[in-house]
């Protein structure tokens, strides 16, 4: 095992020197967590920018805010190398004063057509490239037309079936350098992180291999909602020509410990319209409730909130906020461990022979996840195969939402589980923690924003009823 090197003198990872120097059209840097991939890419980009005039295009799948890009990473490296006085850094751009090098930041999903028309790009750095699609690559590849222009493709492998893994690792194209690097080649790790990694290896060899050795999973059949289903749902309403209508809701997941975060997902009919996430302590529940209440008031939406643990007190706060504002925003408790709805009805409304809800699901959380999973699967089949479904059996996610990468990861992570009666349930937060996966706050809020409530009538006028 490498011993951590002193970091008083900033440097790049010596293990990657030949990777950056050898001529190539595509530089593919992949591997496990804590391996220095993105940090080294940022450092080498800064090195090039102060010595040559280079135009960098820094992209990732979803980027609605500059903070979601590698902008912050580049700023940190500039400061780390003591070069701040050489750069002009604005709120959305970075330029080297002497060479004229510049860094541009784009999200692929929303700006792929704009990217296609960009000129004189020397380096296209694709960060978190595991979400790259074939269609996007077919547009990006001919965009870099200059002599010696190149792509930097940086990612942690997810599935062997992902496009980027098949295209660049399994079937590597010509003029491509691929380099797998893991934590054991990163000389800058602290002993604390090394201890965490060692503990994961002792606890679960398979998870250790996936997380820290960069071994892709063979498939995602163990999860409730497949990643491909979620990505197909991005802007599905536009692809299918559906104008959103119906009930407006805000799903609210409350932080229940110091490291946890609060999250909201706003929905309008089948469409997720907005995502928010923030840090909040348990004693800040009133402040968080006020934030959610204000959002619901602005959107004229109902609130579905997590009523377990600290969330048990949220309802009283919403009641007080309604009284103070002289409004009646409807708010509903979501008890994840609560009873299954419509126990004697088939779990698949289109298949009378399917198991009854009460026989299949362990609790309301499981029922909600599986119901939304079914809608994601329908949407995937509608978008990719042209199959027809009722609008209410579909689901869509606006590409205008923040935190889309996090939402995709969180929705496609929880695995199927079963209770001691053989009924289906969702992998618990404790079991997720054992896999070093944080609480899926955004996904939980998403589920609440679309979860079935039973036969609750839509009011004719907003604000005609209160807590139910």
Image (tube, helix red, strand yellow):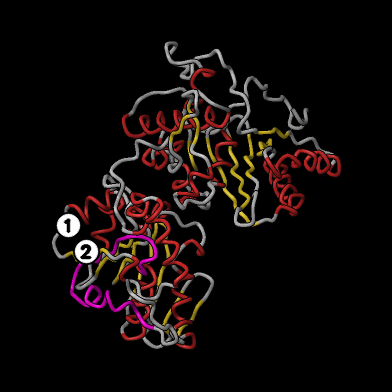
User: Neighbour class for label 1 at 10 Å: few (<14), some, many (≥20)?
Assistant: some
**Number of the label disc, if any, that sits on residue 260:** none
Reply yes or no: does residue 32 show up in magenta.
yes
Rendering coords of residue 101 (x, y %): 37, 79
- Out of 246 and 363, give the one closest to the viewer: 363
Residue range (magenta): 11-36
Q: Secondary structure at mark 1?
A: loop
Q: Which mark is residue 172?
A: 1
Identify the residue at horizontal 60%, vertical 29% (top origin). Answer: 246
Q: CA distance from mark 2 to mark 1?
A: 8 Å
Residue 269, above or below 421: below
Q: Quadrant of the C terminus?
A: top right
Q: Quadrant of residue 15?
A: bottom left
Q: Earlier in the sequence, mark 2 or mark 1?
A: 1
Can residue 121 be seen here? no
Q: Is residue 264 above or below residue 453?
A: below
Give how far across and how far down residue 442 sits, in percent: 55, 46
Q: Foreground residue, 92 or 129?
A: 129
Cβ–Cβ below 8 Å for labels 2 and 1? yes
Q: Which picture quadrant has residue 50? A: bottom left
The answer to whether 419 is drawn above or below residue 84 in the figure is above
Query: In the rendered image, which residue does mark 2 sit on?
Result: 178
Residue 151 left/right relative to 300: left
């Amino acid at each position: 095992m490498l011993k951590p090197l002193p970091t008083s003198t900033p440097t790049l990872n010596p293990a990657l020197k030949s990777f950056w120097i050898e001529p190539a059209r595509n530089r593919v840097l992949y591997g496990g967590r804590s391996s220095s991939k993105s940090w080294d890419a940022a450092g080498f980009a800064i090195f090039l920018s102060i010595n040559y005039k280079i135009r960098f295009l820094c992209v990732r799948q979803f980027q609605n805010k500059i903070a979601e890009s590698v902008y912050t990473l580049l700023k940190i490296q500039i400061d780390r190398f003591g070069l701040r006085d050489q750069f002009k850094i604005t709120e959305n751009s970075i330029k080297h004063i002497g060479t004229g090098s510049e860094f541009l930041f784009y999200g692929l999903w929303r700006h792929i057509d704009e990217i296609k028309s960009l000129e004189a790009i020397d380096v296209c750095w694709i960060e978190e490239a595991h979400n790259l699609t074939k269609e996007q690559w077919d547009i990006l590849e001919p965009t870099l037309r200059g002599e010696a222009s190149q792509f930097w493709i940086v990612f942690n492998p997810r599935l062997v079936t992902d496009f980027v893994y098949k295209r660049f690792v399994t079937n590597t194209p010509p003029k491509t350098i691929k380099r797998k690097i893991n934590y054991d080649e990163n000389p800058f790790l602290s002993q604390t992180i090394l201890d965490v990694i060692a503990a994961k290896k002792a606890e679960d060899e398979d998870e250790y291999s996936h997380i820290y050795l960069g071994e892709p999973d063979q498939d995602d059949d163990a999860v409730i909602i497949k990643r491909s289903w979620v990505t197909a749902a991005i802007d599905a309403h536009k692809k299918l020509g559906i104008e959103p209508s119906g009930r407006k809701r805000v799903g609210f997941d409350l932080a229940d410990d110091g490291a946890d975060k609060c999250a909201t997902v706003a929905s309008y009919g089948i469409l997720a319209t907005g995502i928010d996430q923030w840090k909040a302590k348990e004693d800040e529940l009133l402040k968080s409730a006020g934030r959610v209440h204000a959002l619901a008031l602005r959107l004229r939406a109902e609130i579905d909130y997590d009523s377990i643990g600290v969330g048990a007190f949220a309802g009283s706060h919403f009641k007080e906020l309604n009284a103070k504002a002289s409004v009646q925003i409807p708010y509903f408790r979501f008890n994840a461990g609560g009873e299954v709805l419509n126990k004697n009805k088939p779990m698949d409304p289109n298949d009378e022979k399917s198991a009854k809800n009460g026989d299949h699901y362990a609790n309301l959380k499981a029922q909600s996840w599986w119901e939304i999973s079914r809608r994601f699967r329908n949407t995937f089949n509608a978008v990719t195969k042209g199959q027809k479904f009722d609008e209410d059996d579909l689901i869509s996610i606006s590409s205008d939402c923040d935190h889309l990468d996090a939402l995709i990861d969180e929705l496609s992570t929880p695995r199927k589980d079963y209770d001691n009666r053989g009924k289906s349930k969702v992998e618990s937060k404790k079991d997720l923690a054992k896999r070093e996966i944080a609480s899926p706050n955004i996904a939980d809020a998403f589920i609440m924003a679309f979860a079935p409530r039973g036969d609750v009538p839509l009011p004719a006028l907003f604000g005609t009823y209160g807590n139910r």
